[in-house]
Image (spheres, coloured by chain):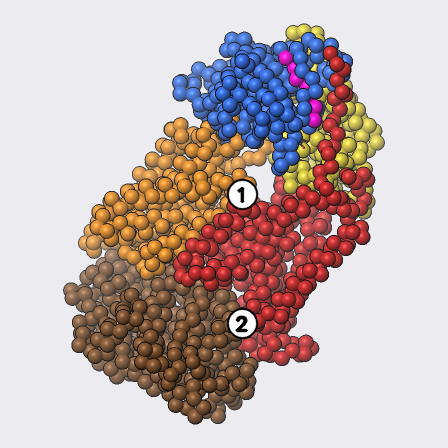
Amino acid sequence: MTVLAPAARPQAAAPRTKYVIVENSPVHHAIRAACIAVAALGVLWASQLAPFRVGQFTTVFIMAIAIIGLNLVTGYTGLLSIGHSAFFGLGAYTTGVLIVKLEFAPLATIPIAMALTFVLGLLVGLPSLRIHGLYLALVTLAVAVAFPEIVRKLESLTGGAAGMVVRSRYLAPPEWTGLVRAQRGIWMFWLSAFVLVLVMILSRSLIRSRFGLMMRTVRDHEIAAAANGVGIARTKILVFGISGAITGLAGALFTMYIGALSPDGSFTLLKAIELVTGLVLGGVATQLGPLIGALAVVFLPYYTASFTTGPLSGVLFGAVLIALCFLMPEGIAGRLGLLIRRVVTVVPKDHPAPPR
Amino acid sequence: ACGSNSSAGDDPADAASAQKGSIDVENCADPDAATRKITGTLKVGWSAATSGPLADAVGNVIEGMEARFAVENAAGGVGGVKLAVVVKDDAFNPERARTNVGELIEKEKVDVLDTFGSGQLDAMSDAQNDACVPLLFGQASVPAYRDATKFPWTTEYLPSADVEMKAVVEGLKKKYPQGAKVALAANQTESGQGYANGFKNAIEGTNFTIAKEAPLTDPNTAASALKASGAPILVDAGVTTDCLALTQAIGRVGWKPETVIQPSNCADGATLYAPAGAAADGQQIMRWLKDPADAAFADDPAVKDYLQKVAANGADSPTNTYTLNGWAIADLMIDVFKSAAKAKDGLSRLSIMEAARTQDYQPPMFIDGIKFTMTQEKSLGIQAFQPFTWHADQKRFLASGDVLNAA
Amino acid sequence: MSLLEVTGLRAGYGGRDVLHGLDMQVDAGQVVVVLGANGAGKTTTMRALAGLISHRGDVTIDGAPLGRRPDEIVRQGVSLVPQGRGTLDISVLDNLRVGAAVRKDSVDEDIERWITTFPALGRRANQRAGTLSGGEQQMLAVARALMSRPRLLLCDEPSLGLAPIVVQELFATLADINRTDGTALLIVEQNAELAMDIADTVYLLEVGTIAAEGPVERFREDDTVRGAYLGY
Amino acid sequence: MLDVTDVAIHFGGVRALDGVTFGVEPGQILGLIGPNGAGKTTLFNCITRIYRPTAGTLRFDGEDLLTIAPHRLAKKGITRTFQNLALFSTLSVFENTMAGGVSQKNRGLRSRAWEILERLDLVDVALEPAAGLPFGTLKRVELARALMARPRLLLLDEPAGGLTHSEVDDLGRLLVSLRDDYGFAALLVEHHMGLVLGISDHVVALDFGQKIYEGTPAGVREDDAVVAAYLGRPKTGAREAR
Amino acid sequence: MELFVERLLAGLTNGSVYALLALALVVVYRATGTLNFAQGELALFTTFVAWWLTTLDAPVWVAIVAALIVGFVLGAAIERLLIRPVQRKNDMAVLIVALGLFTGLNSLAGLLWGSETKIMPSPFPNGLDDYVSVFGARLYGDALGVWAALIVLLGLMTLLFRRTRIGLHMRAVAANPESAALAGVRTGRILMVGWGLSGAIGALAGVLVTPLAPEQLGLTTMFHIFIAASAAALFGGLDSLPGAVVGGLTIGVLEALLSGYVSFIGGELQQTSALLIIVAILFIRPNGLFGSKRTVRV
Ligand SMILES: Nc1ncnc2c1ncn2[C@@H]1O[C@H](COP(=O)(O)OP(=O)(O)OP(=O)(O)O)[C@@H](O)[C@H]1O
Ligand SMILES: Nc1ncnc2c1ncn2[C@@H]1O[C@H](COP(=O)(O)OP(=O)(O)OP(=O)(O)O)[C@@H](O)[C@H]1O
Ligand SMILES: [Mg+2]
Ligand SMILES: [Mg+2]
């Protein structure tokens, strides 16, 4: 018989992708710069729209920040949370109460709102030491259910069930901006956009840091993560804290934007579900997913409602959600990522032998 | 709605502007627009939940309003200006209401706004006051908006819970001159708490005491607890869905309080009382609207007129309370528009708001002797009620006293 | 006509083919061994034949086209012992009962048979399979596949993780069912020596194609095969 | 370096380990063999604190392992591979390897990861997600990950599973040279006798949770207990290789 | 005493309501390994169907049987058409499909039958006089009926999973659909039957529950019940049938007693406190009271 070819390991199969880009090479930088430019143009364009559209985009940015917070816990660490409405609400109410009761300048409330939501995050993360999976989701659900009830109970502080109105004069742009009170809309737009960019950068560097790697190992395999030196408990608790603080930050901005808080309006379980919906539609564990998801949860119901009236809009909305999951089960950004990765590979600079 | 401690007001600038007695347009985003004469069509923009659990209620209110506007338009409109309604769904979500108010003002260029629910009103009020677009007869009863100095461009339709409860206590005083113990069932939402607090305020200084207060989260538990208090009076500080549930719950624990007071938003006898059978017998309620379904009003000319016209103009449940409310609100609006049209500069947002601030009018569908009253400083709205009692055997309400004025 | 006829089999993952057109045959009662290096596509072949991934090309069982879903294929008499842990996290006995899902007759006798063959399973009869040791799970996977009394048994590295004594036992058992029940075997096995002992034919798979095929004896004599797979 | 003393653990009625005692010297490769279900993996799990033994002590450099939090073991120098793969399936091979180094100082970690990947011939697949790679490759990824923490004691649970004969031989040579270069001790669980007996310095055999043999590799085949419980009697001489 | 018994009975009745729906959740979970977030709205929809039939003068029992059938068919169809194609690709997306169903079914009910509250007649005697006295507290026929239905259902489901072939196959599919298919289990059919069964149980829960529910039959009726039922299912241990029942009853009784006796909690923190107690218990038993521990072996 013929002599067989040496049965060594197969050669690395034909080049997997069409293009290979070396990380931080000029090409890579150029592509990145182009993307940033397009995004910046998009924001500029949005800022020129009618004020209510500007307001809508402000909501999108705020929701995107909230979803980025959720993404850290649910997307990158694999802990399903249906309690992020509570972080959003605590951030919002902290800002509201500080402005109304203690006459804080709105921006000055942000650190306090973040600190409180960070602590709440640590507390919610605590059970994750022992409780896993859907059982942990139940814990977060408890927090979501508890939040409006507690707000109602603390009537003297929060205004109880009647809610709390922060009049617009408290929310005027700070003087240094040179904007006047009537320009509150555009101020909140730029403020939210700015914070969103900051948070996106922050989340990106977090994910790429050693801690981010730990988060992802915890998600993929807890036992193996521990065996490699990842403190599971510490990681989960800290992630919940950071995530809570980011979603709380979104809540603080929300108060500044909307000026009216009510426990049954924006901070119920339904808000938590909205955040999860945004995350999954946008793309779990992706950098752009939260923004895309926020666009979806703000604009989809808006357009389904303007398309038809009454209950039919709800039917339509449900149908669109399902259709999106059919078309893109990985979420929009997830699907985009897959497509891009099929064409392009980004190779780290220190790769000894870059695949062609 | 008491206990709302919104920061509304305490702004010297706002207070000063209202002192002149008329409304100031200098702070408006676009003062010219506020005084520009309205011609052609006057648009009333709604942000309300046309989807979700409240869809039917909201839909009926709007149908009632549209029917009334259609009648007016057929008669030539308000001084030639036709009335139209624009609706945006907010799914009972304040953020959506916030967007809607902007879109209605900027894109739809509405002249007047309206909404359903206090959370949405809260989310809209600042924007709408800044833009100087009147929000008239909002379907809410948040005390903050009663103060014209703080929210000059906002008025509410629903009677304040304080006022209603005052009327309730007036009635109770007649029945129990010595005072009595009261069992209070309170819903945990904004309107439930409003009633509960309103009742507590109203019995201050009287001999009525609250023997037990129980939350309506679970009506059965509430019924057991309240029954144990042994109070002869049960006050339901609830929302529409609580009325029947509480009635059935007390029936099932075998409790028959001497007096049961239901809130005025439980006005629909057929759906909220009749199904409970004997358990609902003798329950009391405060009303301000004539009941088009009831034989007692069969000969009332206003009711006849209403029944004849409302269905003819597209509202498919004429006897529904929400339809009726929508019609009555439209009546009130038309009255406002008519007086505004008589103003020096004619029909404008400003003249509408000024007219609304001095309104004193009884829509035909209000029970005789009950008016909608406004003053420059205070939105009083509905201040009087007539007590009615449910008769289970006849399946209808019968008046059980004269109109009580709580002013 | 062969029991299993494979012509031009292509299959892969996410739009990328791993198998580039395989031709294979297994006759009734025959034992066929597939050899191949790490990553050659052996598991992919088995998964395609068991219906776990979709394939292109013609595959027939007794002349009838191969079913599309795994359970259809089991009904056609083809069972797979998957690579790695293929057990269900229910009790050991329940695993065996589920293995007989396509059968209508009594199964107690078979359960008895495999528990005696693999005493370790008997000792753990009511334990959840998820807590078994790796080797115990592997035995269970083999036993479960046999519970359906297949005409063709596909084994993807059945000896993985088994102690030498059990491996000998296993191959003796496989030879036995082949002999007494006439079950045809298609075995992917790194433990080539033992597998070739009971095999009639060998296929050598390389990067998704058949590099060589022939009777066992020819392969035993090939130096490359000996170096790579037999170790002498 | 590692002292296992009278370690016992049971799950319900199952005595998975029943008073096992032995030690590992620095730089030694100790082969741990035994029939399926003998308790080998369970012993690994006790050492890495996935299970807590019901009795007995485990000491590493004299320090009681049971007082150390499981995730500190990597920093102490104990890492392992898993019998049935416990990789981070959505991460790339490179990231999986990097994850092995989270207990280490950041400096030079990336270049170390590349070095190990080169050494294990994994550079070609470094950017591929772990899910979807062939079984044998993944076994090497586990090894790469375990090496990142500069282990002093490496626990290898059936590293040769799924490899062809020549690949097993390569692996054996690789392990020995890695041990020589990095200077770790290894506890090797493997059913591939050629590998175990070929590279171990010392062998321990377990059966039903008890030690039935401890001694030289050469002695294993002569030991009746081990042969009866584990090796069996090959029918033909040709199978001697296994 | 009377007050205590009244509260206890009220709690038990609410609890059996939660338990019924929790059983439906457990059945889906045991048969398919997923948590059905649309379970509540599915039950709502079928209850609307039953109600609608009663308005067409169908006898209550006929309406209920029809609702069960619709529930089964709907559940099975949803699995086949909406869940399965997505589940194969992404588990997380299933959650969103369920949420889409949640909104869609709710709105569809609103579209077909309006958002006004309906009154669903009870199949059991529930007149004001249809009670027996227990230590002075009244125990009504419809409450007894729900209890009985719960016990019967628990028995039937336990038999199904323990004794029948289809039950065995359901457990196999839930444990690992791929391996089950390799063993020859018709996984597709099992998944459909599992979802269908839970749809039918949900429908039963709906028609029995709504006559007792404070809000009767409205678009929001099932939401709170669903939340409580999922808490109950988890508390009992997601894969345990008796667990779901014990969980449901515990939550019902806790809610009733806490809000009745602990004045600080009052009614305002009723749900919160019940859930917090459950979370505290999960700390001690992280897989629920009766849930089986899933050991991941490495
Ligand atoms: N789920 C998957 N997704 C993507 N690619 C895959 C997947 N499974 C296998 N592959 C690819 O298919 C090729 C063949 O893999 P396969 O598992 O069939 O090899 P094998 O011959 O069984 O190897 P081993 O001896 O390691 O088990 C490999 O290149 C592998 O990367
Ligand atoms: N968590 C557990 N629950 C119940 N039994 C267990 C558990 N872990 C291990 N066992 C039992 O302990 C025994 C030893 O298992 P272990 O995995 O250590 O065996 P092993 O020696 O590694 O075998 P193999 O060579 O097959 O991998 C087995 O019989 C197994 O069933
Ligand atoms: Mg393979
Ligand atoms: Mg093992």
The subunit letter for the residue under badge 1 reads E
Q: At numbered mark 1, what does the secondary structure look like: helix, strand or loop?
A: helix
Q: Residue at x 49, y 85 (%)?
A: B36
Query: Which chain is in yellow here?
Result: D
**Quarter residue B190 falls in:** bottom left
Query: Relative to B40, is E204 above or below?
Result: above
Colour assigned to chain A in the rendering is red
Q: Is residue D215 visible?
A: no
Residue at left offset 48%, top offset 35%: E174
Does the magenta segment cover residue C165?
no
Q: Specify the colour of chain B.
A: brown
Q: Residues within 10 Å of mark 1 (few under 14, many from 20)?
A: some
User: Which residue is disc 2 drawn over?
Assistant: A259
Residue A174 visible in rendering:
yes
Q: What residue range appears in magenta?
A: C201-207
What residue occupies the far top of the structure in this picture?
A: D236
Q: Colour of chain C?
A: blue
Going by the numbered disc 2, the residue's amino acid type is: Gly
Quarter in which the C terminus of chain B is drawn: bottom left
Write down which chain is painted orange: E
**Disc 1: which residue:** E91
Q: Is residue A145 above or below residue C214?
A: below
Query: In the rendered view, would you say A346 is above or below B8?
Result: above
The residue type indicated by label 1 comes to Asp
Does C204 lie within the magenta span? yes
| Discs 1 and 2 share one subunit | no
Magenta span: predominant SS is strand
Is E252 left or right of B151, judged from the image as shown? left
